Amino acid sequence: MKKTMAGDFLIYDKSSNTYRADPEQIVRDDVEKHYWLNVVRSILKDWRLYLMLIPMILVFLFWRYFPMYELLASFKSTANMQTPVSEREFIGFSAFTKIIAGDMAPRFWRALRNTFLLSFYGLCFGFPMPIILALFFNEIKSNFLRSIYQVLTYLPKFVSTVIMTSIVTMLLKQGGLTFDDGILVKALHSMGVIGKEAVETGMLRNPDFFRSIYQISGIWEGAGYDSIVYFAAIIAISPTSYEAAQIDGAGKMAQMRYVVIPSILSTLVIMLITRIGSLLQIGYEKVILLSHETTKSTAEVVSTMAYELGGMGGEGSGASVPGIAMAAEMMNNVVGMLLVIGANTIAKKASNVSLY
């Protein structure tokens, strides 16, 4: 170990033949000494901003962090749901064993597969659509027309899931090739996209059509609203970048490729990482409203499985059905966390842009 000497902290003054303190070290010592005082002063100076932060902190505490305590129920018996979690019998990984390799394994792995496929298709087809919309909005020169188009694409996001799925149901209503058919069913059948058998069976009752219906309705619902972030990044690009590209002879497509896309690349990477983080987070509301008993093979996801099992009663002192539901959701969240870490690591090494 190197021996600490006075010369490491002091500066020798030849004129007076003495040692004096380093001015930079004095400043560092003063900052370190009054660190918390400076923090308090900063908070008091911007107290309005911190006051606005309190509601969001409370939301995260009550809806994100405090519910984590209930995850302990995955490792404890839920035979008596009225008993506090801390007082229930500890059963270890019994619930996880049942969903991974036990009698609930086939249903869980099918639900996890459906969850991943729905999210993956949404990532492949749903993620590029807001970017394309933002690029189109940027090319509209009239502010009035652009505002109209943007409002029309934002509106579906502010419609409740129940109303949105009701509209989809009416458009795809089954009538058996009669006047009662939905308008989309008639159009698709007349174009030869779907056959007579599919119409008579009903598109919403056919497991082969569920994923397509879910993805297309999801793009219709969220593409316009999600384009806000990308459009804000695009309008922040300096006009001189476009002028330099035009001088070099670049057309509209070349400007998008060599000016717009590289300028918003960091935004794309961050949004992609957050999208991958929620890859396995599919809510049960829309799936339940659009699915049918006949489409369970492709429609049942982890959240709907947990929702259904969570309402059932216990099974003695072992791993009860509610405990299995909690274990399934916990497994889903753990996989999602690993996906975020993996995507962030790859993005950091590939483009030097990361979420953290």
Image (cartoon, rainbow, N blue to C red):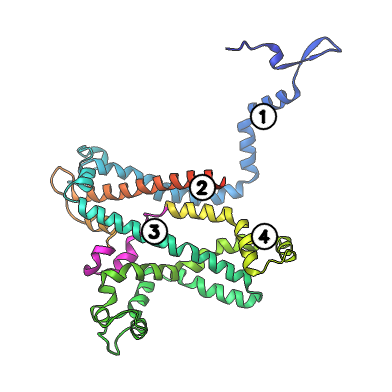
Going from N to C along the chain, the mark reached first, 1 or 2, is: 1
Going from N to C along the chain, the mark reached first, 4 or 1, is: 1
| Residues at marks 4 and 1 touching, judged by CB atoms closer than 8 Å | no
Q: Can residue 69 be seen at all in this image of the molecule?
A: yes
Residue 127 image position (x, y, % from top left): 47, 62
Residue 78 image position (x, y, % from top left): 20, 45
Amino acid type, label 1: Val
Query: Which residue lies under the disc numbered 3?
Result: 120
The residues bearing labels 4 and 3 have C-alpha atoms spaced at a distance of 31 Å
Judge from the rendering whether residue 304 lies leftward or rightward of residue 267; answer left or right. left
Amino acid type, label 3: Phe
Query: Which residue lies under the disc numbered 4?
Result: 237
Q: Quadrant of the N terminus?
A: top right
Q: Can you tell which of label 1 and label 2 is closer to the viewer? A: 2
Going from N to C along the chain, the mark reached first, 2 or 4, is: 4
Q: Callout 3: helix, strand or loop?
A: helix
Judge from the rendering whether residue 107 lies leftward or rightward of residue 19; answer left or right. left
| Residues at marks 3 and 2 touching, judged by CB atoms closer than 8 Å | no
The residues bearing labels 3 and 1 have C-alpha atoms spaced at a distance of 50 Å
Query: Which residue lies under the disc numbered 2?
Result: 347
Q: Furthest-left residue in view? A: 316
Q: Callout 1: helix, strand or loop?
A: helix
Judge from the rendering whether residue 108 lies leftward or rightward of residue 339; answer left or right. left
Q: Furthest-right residue in view? A: 15
Query: Which residue lies under the disc numbered 1?
Result: 31
Within 10 Å of the Cα at label 4, are there few (<14), some (14-19), or many (20+) other Cα atoms? some
Within 10 Å of the Cα at label 1, are there few (<14), some (14-19), or many (20+) other Cα atoms? few
Residue at x-position 63% and y-position 33%: 37
Q: Callout 4: helix, strand or loop?
A: loop
Q: Furthest-front residue in view? A: 249
The residues bearing labels 3 and 2 have C-alpha atoms spaced at a distance of 18 Å
